[in-house]
Every structure is written in C-alpha cells, then in structure tokens.
Amino acid sequence: MSENGYLLELHNVSQVYGSGERRFTAIKDFNLTLKEGEFAALLGPTGCGKSTLLRIISGLQVPTAGQVMYRSRPLVGVNPHATIVFQTFALFPWLTVQENVEVALKARGVPAKLRATRALDLLDRVGLDGFENAYPRELSGGMLQKVGFARAMAVEPELLCLDEPFSALDVLSAEALRGELLELWTSGKIPTRAILLVTHNIDEAVFMADRIVVMEKDPGRVILDLKVDLPHPRQRKNSQFLELVDKVYAILAGQTQPEHVELGTAPGEPGRTRSLPHITINDLTGLLEHLGEMPGNRTDIYRLADGLKINPDYFLSLIEAAELLGFATIAHGDITLTPLGDTFAEAGILARKGIFATRIRRLPLFKWLMTLLNAADKKQLEWDVVQTALELEFHEEEAERQLDTAIDWGRYAEILAYDDGSQVLYLEPAA
Ligand code: ADP
Ligand code: MG
C-alpha cells in the first residue's frame, strides 16, 4: 500500500502540442487520483485528451506541466506496473495465439517451462480455449481482442488502462468480453489493483465502473466525477442502474429545466403534450456532426442555417429535436453541442443507437406508447388503434405524422418494430 492509499495521482497535468501558431493546449490542469481497488471510466468527446492521458499515466509521454505520482513517488520513465489495451491490438502475425501470449510472459521474466501452462490458462480465461495454435489472420476481431486482453493480463499489470477496448467489436463479443473482464476483476483472480477504462459508451461505463469521470475538450478537463455504488453483477433493467445512466445522460445533456417543463406531458395527461419534430435521424446526425466540427462546438444559429442550405422550417425542427434529446442547447442565438451531443456525434453506429434509445425512452410520448404496447395482447397494436388514441391530443393529420416519426425513431433505436404489411406496431423483444 502506498502512503496515502493512492495508486495514481495526477496533479495539474497539462499537455501542450505543436509550436508557434500550431501550438495548442490539449489538456489543462487535469487532476485525478485513483485508489487501489478502483475501477474508473473516463468518458469524453474525441480529442479531449483521453489517449494522451493514458500515455502520460503509463509514462510513455512526459506532460508539459504537472506531476504524475505512482504509489506516492514521482513517475520516472515508463511505468512498469501499467499496461494499455488499445481498441485494436497489434499481434505478431507470424506467431500463434499461444506464442503471442508467451512473448509477454517472457518479457515479464516467467521461466520458459512455466510459460506454456500460464499462456493456456490465460487463453482459457478469456474464452479462447481451442484456438491456441491459430494464427492472428485466422481470427475474428473479437477473438483478436481477446488475445490482446490475455496478453495484457499476462503482464499482470497493477494498473490496467483500457482505451476503448470494446468499441471495434460486434455486440456479442463486446458483451462477452466485458463479462470476462468483470469476472476476473471482481473475483480477484488477477493482481490488477486499479482499472481506467476509456469509453464512449455510457451504458458500458455504468455497467462496469465504480466511478465515472466525464471530460470536456478545448482544453481537456474534468467536468464530472460520479460514484457508481452498485454491486456486481449489475442488472441493466434495475431501477438504480437506470437512474444512474439517466443521471450521466442528464449531466452530459446539460439539462437546465425540470423534466416536465422540458419534455412536456404524455397524451391524456393534463399539460402540453410535446410533439415530436418531424425530422429524420440521418439529418439530425448530419447536423450534430457539422456542429462538432465548429470551434468550441458552438455557432450562431443563423449562420448555421445559411451554411446548411436547407429549408428554414425543417432546420428549426432539427434544432428542436437536438434540444429535445439533450444533444444541443440554445441560448442568445447560439447553438452549442452538449457533451452528450458530442459523444453521440463521435460515436459508432451501435453506441449512437444506444444513446438515442435512452433519450427517447424519456420522452412522455414514447413512455406512453411503450406502456400502451406493454399492456397490449402480444405486446402489439394496430396502427389505427394507436392513431385514434393520439387523436385525443393532436388533429388527425398531425396524429398520423406523430406516429410516423415515432416509428421512425423507435426503429432506429431498436425499441419498436412496425410491420408495413399487417400495419401492426410491436415492441422489440429486448425493449
Ligand atoms: P482522445 O483520445 O480523447 O480522442 P487524444 O489524446 O488522442 O484525444 O488527443 C487530444 C488532442 O491532442 C487532439 O486534438 C489531438 O489531435 C491532439 N494530439 C494528440 N497527440 C498529438 C501529438 N502527438 N501531436 C500533436 N497533437 C496531438
Ligand atoms: Mg483516443
């Protein structure tokens, strides 16, 4: 144990890149401490300095300013106790899976006769039993990443740094590997004392970490440090889990108004039912990506409208949708991407769907629709029935358009399905 209980301490770390006119501050006055036993997730938009931080922490890079302490001592040179697992792992193509792991064991000073057994054991633990003699080119992305994990584990790092390790994997492999890692971590089968996981996936952070640190960019800094006090294994449908996911989303979305004011009420309830703006996800995504390229993720609304050259009414609907979903805020004629909007714009297709699903579930109109479907026989309803119900709130034509938009969004989020032939609406099994 180090003197103050901290494994890692970053004090006022800053990183400046480039020189002259190109000089810019990537990270400014960054503070972070990590205790033994902690699993922290680091969330933040691309370019906020996450990878830079991991390099600084592992001693691969010396920051421009500030101090890095490891076990209460200033870090000098490469940190032999830290390992980074990257999004994609470079394996030696001419070595088998087992040999790739043995190389790491050798570097670690494990005697030759123990290496084979240890390598096989590690491969077994990450679920690669039976693939010992395969070559990297024979493996899928998920399996390659498992070899990467096995190799990182072989080094028995005290501090395990993970740089978006699951983002290049398909859904099932990612989920399996998350489970394997959590099992190794919570069972204490590995000597790792702390984990720092960089991710774009909010759900993944709440599922795995004990603490969530959210960063902003320009310059990279901490805007939130939240404790996740839930026992493992965590249930994604548990109400406390959902509350936490919601909280992180709300902070990222920069929600300022109480929810009922911001989101309106459901059909049939007193108060105003907030209608869904009629926009396509594709256009919304385009707008958010465009905003993400602006300095400070902010711009004048009218300049933006000019630059995009689209119908002004449609443009306003896009902005309304971005605001309703917590992806952007509007003040004094400026539109600014929220950290959530930025995360969405930078994320891959699956993470985007996840973020979108979480957001629309909070909309009263969707909550109402899902309750209706859940209560229905076989969890399905005819289009006409839903439209008639919506007509309590909207005139006929608008009710139809609301339902069209809801189906479009719900399909994208993989919450709802709609069969055109039978004109039946139903819930996706996982929803
Ligand atoms: P993240 O991992 O959060 O996407 P990075 O740490 O990769 O962020 O990068 C932070 C910022 O620093 C980015 O603007 C990036 O372009 C810049 N950057 C990173 N590494 C270098 C480098 N070696 N030289 C110059 N700029 C860099
Ligand atoms: Mg990075």
Image: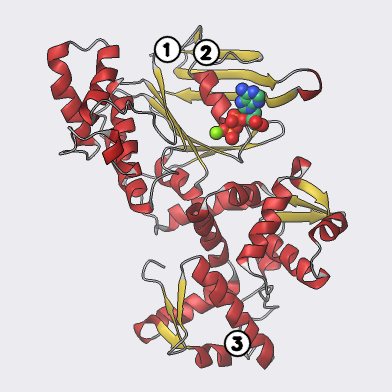
For the point 66% across and 62% down, the residue is 284
Which element type, helix, strand or loop, lies under badge 1?
loop
- Of residue 17 and residue 83, the one placed in the foreground of this image is 17
Pointer 2 and pointer 1: residues touching (CB < 8 Å)?
Answer: no
Which element type, helix, strand or loop, lies under badge 2?
strand
Q: Which amino acid does label 1 sit on?
A: Ser
Count of numbered marks:
3
Neighbours of disc 1 within 10 Å: few (<14), some (14-19), many (20+): few
In this rendering, the label closer to the viewer, 2 or 1: 2
- Image coordinates for residue 162, horizontal then vertical, percent: 43, 32
Give the answer, above or below, for where 97 lies relative to 312. above
Pointer 3 residue: 390
Which quadrant: the C terminus?
A: bottom left
Instruction: Quadrant for residue 160, please give it.
Output: top left
Pointer 1 residue: 2
Neighbours of disc 3 within 10 Å: few (<14), some (14-19), many (20+): many
Pointer 2 residue: 69
Q: Which amino acid does label 3 sit on?
A: Leu
- Of residue 257 and residue 51, the one placed in the foreground of this image is 51
- On screen, residue 283 versus residue 100, left or right, reads right
- On screen, residue 71 versus residue 158, left or right, reads right
